[in-house]
């Protein structure tokens, strides 16, 4: 199909072959219009019945909506056509018939509930406003990858089948690995840390993570895509700088390359690249500010995680992206470094969007003895993590890093109501196929 022309590119005066889906057929008697849709848009095909042979007419106008066709013909200027041109066909070929009963209407005239849309994602993604989300997601990943390369990172891929978890045992999916118990990985954390001590020093990964989250929420998936960064010889503040840079690069990429998609989503005017440096509030300041909003049912005290309610209240108060730094050591994982002069406080941070958490990161504990002591303090058995801790005995530099959820980034960027809108085939408690 080398000679295929996209609907949006068909120019008056030329002979062209277009291919796509039948969006609509309007039969007005002596004349009929078929609207063909492809990935670039729609084009009108005009059938003047007394000028065409019977078979071609029957084949084209007898096809069901959403059938796939190829049309060869002459492109003519036509003011009244939606795109200013129309195709006068010489041949029409039906490549794949669609059933007359569609489970979902891709023209969007009939609304469908999210479960129906997810069951029929192929049809759902024929809608421009759904397709736009995934084109934007693709651009986000491109921009992020380019940004990482511009700051000297190497892209890595780490195992998704693992022997132990990293973020706590309850969220693990167990599997059977040649008769032994294994798990789906919930984060590349330990692997990427091991790479800062390798010759690579500075790495990133974009890959799946698996978490047996207990509840169905609008912002949790059981399989998500994580963007991970880890670098030797940086502290948590430098890691936050890279985090900010990544976020800005993602927004800039979308602003520059996805104008059509933003238009389709009705966001062209309001879409902005977050500017300036994001405020870095200490955890102590953050809980005081959240309490001071007077919006919380439960007042926060040192050691509490930020509840959803607190994230909302604080987000509204700050009004943009912000970091929360210096978290209580007890609620951050064992691999986060604590301040030597204040062991109750850690060098962990979160990047928050006003609606929810986007990123967790921190300065890591790179000193073998402190790392093992940290395991014990958190009630973990260090011998289970020997494959990780052992390598800290052979020259592990100071390092820091963080991890984003791609879906949360896209969800907050496009103000989507549910995280499932930002993943093609979501995995949640109910959904295992398609
Ligand atoms: P939360 O408290 O919001 O459940 P978390 O602190 O458990 O998130 P982290 O372990 O810090 O998550 O993971 C880093 C990032 O990965 C999160 O900030 C978030 O963007 C994303 N993420 C984590 N779990 C999920 C999930 N179940 N579904 C989608 N994204 C997730
Ligand atoms: Mg977190």
Image (cartoon, helix red, strand yellow):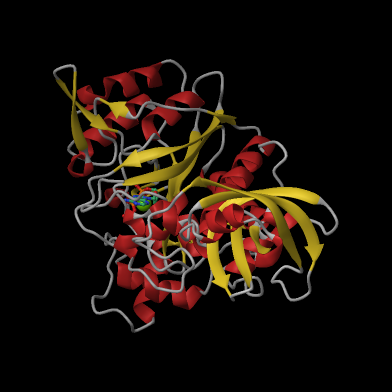
Q: Taking 347 as reference, is 78 above or below it?
A: below
214 and 197: which one is in front? 214
Q: Taking 257 as reference, is 274 above or below it?
A: below
Q: Is residue 284 visible?
A: yes
Residue 410 percent coordinates (x, y): 50, 57
Q: Residue at point 39% right, 53% down?
A: 121
Q: Taking 334 as reference, is 307 above or below it?
A: below
Q: Taking 151 as reference, is 35 above or below it?
A: below
Extreme residue in the left direction: 179
Indicate the quadrant where residue 25 lies. bottom right
Residue 63 percent coordinates (x, y): 49, 57
Extreme residue in the right direction: 13
Q: Is residue 276 visible?
A: no
38 and 343: which one is in front? 38
Q: Residue at point 39% right, 40% down?
A: 337
Indicate the quadrant where residue 43 lies. bottom right
Residue 246 percent coordinates (x, y): 59, 49
Relative to residue 347, is residue 181 drawn left or right? Answer: left
Quadrant containing the N terminus is top right
201 and 236: which one is in front? 201
Residue 306 percent coordinates (x, y): 32, 64
Tally of numbered tags: 0
384 and 273: which one is in front? 273
């Amino acid at each position: 199909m080398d000679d295929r022309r996209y609907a949006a590119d068909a120019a008056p005066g030329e002979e062209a072959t277009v291919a796509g889906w039948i969006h609509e057929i309007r039969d007005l008697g002596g004349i009929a219009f078929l609207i063909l849709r492809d990935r670039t848009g729609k084009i009108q095909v005009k059938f003047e019945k007394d000028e065409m042979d019977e078979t071609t007419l029957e084949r084209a106008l007898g096809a069901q909506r959403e059938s796939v066709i190829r049309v060869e013909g002459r492109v003519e200027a036509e003011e009244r056509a939606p795109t200013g041109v129309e195709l006068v066909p010489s041949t029409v070929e039906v490549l794949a018939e669609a059933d007359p009963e569609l489970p979902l209407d891709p023209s969007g005239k009939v609304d469908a509930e999210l479960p129906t849309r997810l069951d029929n994602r192929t049809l759902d993604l024929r809608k421009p406003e759904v397709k736009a989300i995934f084109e934007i997601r693709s651009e986000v990943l491109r921009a992020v990858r380019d940004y990482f390369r511009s700051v000297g990172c190497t892209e890595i891929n780490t195992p998704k089948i693992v022997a132990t978890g990293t973020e706590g045992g309850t969220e693990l999916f167990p599997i059977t690995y040649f008769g032994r118990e294994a798990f789906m990985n919930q984060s590349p954390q330990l692997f990427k840390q091991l790479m800062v001590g390798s010759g690579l020093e500075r790495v990133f990964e974009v890959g799946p993570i698996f978490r047996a989250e207990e509840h169905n929420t609008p912002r949790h998936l059981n399989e998500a895509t994580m963007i991970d960064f880890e670098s030797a010889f940086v502290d948590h503040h430098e890691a936050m700088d890279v985090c900010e840079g990544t976020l800005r690069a993602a927004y800039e990429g979308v602003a520059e390359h996805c104008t059509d998609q933003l238009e389709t989503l009705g966001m062209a005017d309001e879409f902005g690249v977050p500017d300036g440096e994001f405020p870095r509030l200490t955890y102590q300041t953050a809980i005081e500010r959240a309490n001071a909003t007077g919006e919380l049912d439960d007042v926060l005290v040192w050691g509490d995680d930020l509840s959803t309610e607190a994230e909302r209240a604080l987000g509204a108060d700050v009004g943009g992206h912000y970091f929360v730094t210096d978290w209580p050591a007890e609620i951050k994982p064992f691999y986060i470094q604590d301040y030597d002069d204040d062991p109750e406080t850690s060098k962990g941070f979160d990047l928050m969007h006003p609606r929810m958490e986007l990123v967790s990161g921190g300065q890591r504990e790179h000193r073998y003895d402190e790392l093992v002591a940290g395991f014990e303090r958190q009630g973990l058995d260090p011998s289970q993590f020997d494959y990780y801790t052992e390598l800290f005995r052979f020259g592990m530099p100071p390092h820091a890093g963080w991890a984003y959820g791609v879906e949360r980034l896209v969800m907050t960027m496009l103000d989507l109501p549910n995280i499932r809108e930002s993943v093609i085939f979501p995995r949640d408690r109910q959904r295992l196929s398609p």
